[in-house]
Amino acid sequence: MSEDVLKIGLLGCGPIAQFAHLPALAKARRVALRAICDGAEDLLHAIGRRYGVQSLHQDYAAFLNDSDIDAVLIAVPDVFHVPLACQALAAGKHVLVEKPLGDSADECWELLCAVRRTGLKLQVGNMKRHDPGIAFAHRFVREQLGQILSVSGWYCDSLFRPAFLETLLPPTVTSQRAIRPSADPKADKRRYSLVTHGAHLLDNLRYLGGAITGVTARLAEKRGQHSWHGLLEFEHGGLGHFELTVKTNADWSEGYRIYGEHGSVEVKTFVPFYYRPSEVRAFDARTEQWYAPLGAHSNPYKNQLEAFARSVLDNEPVNPDASEGLATVCLLEAIEASVGAGQHTEVRQMSAEP
Ligand SMILES: NC(=O)c1ccc[n+]([C@@H]2O[C@H](COP(=O)([O-])OP(=O)(O)OC[C@H]3O[C@@H](n4cnc5c(N)ncnc54)[C@H](O)[C@@H]3O)[C@@H](O)[C@H]2O)c1
């Protein structure tokens, strides 16, 4: 690549684009927003005006033909991720696609094959990996902990999150003309809650703890609230457990605990829009010292864009890549299957080279 800036086109001007991606695109180093696409004309022009972007497209194929963009940031409903990411790769564009990678493991496999065929970069929007606290915890586990015994995590979404978001964020622009999936993804509240929040929790558990091969999960459901609990079996032989509760009559709560041969790591994670880095305490038993990172650059959406730019411009590894996005979708499917069958379920291992 001749220039030192990654020229990005944004697909989708919905809430996450307005809350997170557009402000991050305006700030991120080595990234320039060059074009926007949204099927809703009113929304597209309102957002284009706000961010001073001239190249505005309602038609996705015409947007992909724009030779001024190297990469596409896909922020549309989950069921559209795989077909639209495949179309972007076919047009020669690198892709940063929102989490979860796709709607099923089988379709994610097709996308992974397309990534390998084209040699282009595809990063999944698990921005929590780019929270400097989580990134520090990941490094400490890999470099200091030795063999891992136990890895646990919880993610409990608060009933008060809408009030937190109304307090923290500007009002969003909406459109009656937005392109929506034919079936409302929120109609099946149980699946929607598992997938939309579980995609973060389970990716973090895999990132911090390693590959997961088996799961035994149960679900409690009361008054539209869901609580999944489960035993996790890791490839390295360690065990762990998870809790995903949506929603709680309590504050937001998310955290991780890893115990290893030479020490331990404790992580407390905040609502992303506080832009607070996760608080991490890491203990090295060999020196009897605690470590805690500051994490001053703590906007995970901005950090993930800068990491994406490095992966394309400097050929650095993608974090997380399509095979990891696929592994998280396989784990989500194993949890659903385990709850349905009431028994231990093996997690499909689909990410190996074909
Ligand atoms: N990482 C996070 O913290 C986080 C938070 C919230 C949502 N998300 C994810 O972000 C994604 C988007 O969520 P949202 O609620 O902002 O989206 P949304 O449902 O509001 O859709 C965004 C926009 O995409 C446009 N669109 C859809 N298909 C199109 C097409 N083919 N061509 C042109 N425009 C098209 C629609 O018109 C709409 O305006 C989801 O996958 C969701 O899971 C991530």
Image: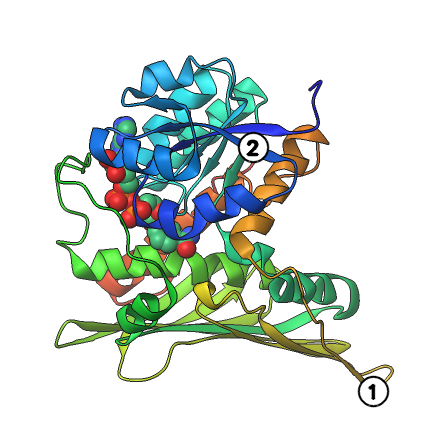
Q: Position of residue 354 (x, y in %)?
A: 53, 28
- Can you see residue 163? yes
Q: Answer with left or right where residue 17 lies relative to residue 219.
A: right
* Res 200 quadrant in image: bottom left
> Which quarter shows the N terminus?
top right
- Image region (quadrant) for ligand 1: top left
Residue positioned 31% across, 71% down in the render: 161
Secondary structure at badge 2 equals: strand
What's the distance in space between the residues labelled 2 and 1, CA to CA?
A: 46 Å
Query: Tag 1: residue type?
Result: Glu
Secondary structure at badge 1 equals: loop
Disc 1 marks which residue? 288
* Res 146 quadrant in image: bottom right
Q: Are marks 2 and 1 in contact (CB under 8 Å)?
A: no
- Closer-to-camera residue (56/352): 56
Residue positioned 19% across, 48% down in the render: 185
- Closer-to-camera residue (159/256): 159
Q: Answer with left or right where residue 145 lies relative to residue 179.
A: right
Query: Tag 2: residue type?
Result: Ala
Residue lying farthest to the right in this orientation: 287
Q: Residues within 10 Å of mark 1 (few under 14, many from 20)?
A: few
Work out whether 2 lies above or below 180. Answer: above
Q: Which tag is nearer the camera, tag 2 or tag 1?
A: 2
Q: Answer with left or right where residue 115 lies relative to residue 336.
A: right
* Res 278 quadrant in image: bottom right
- Can you see residue 106? no
Disc 2 marks which residue? 32
Q: Which mark is residue 33?
A: none
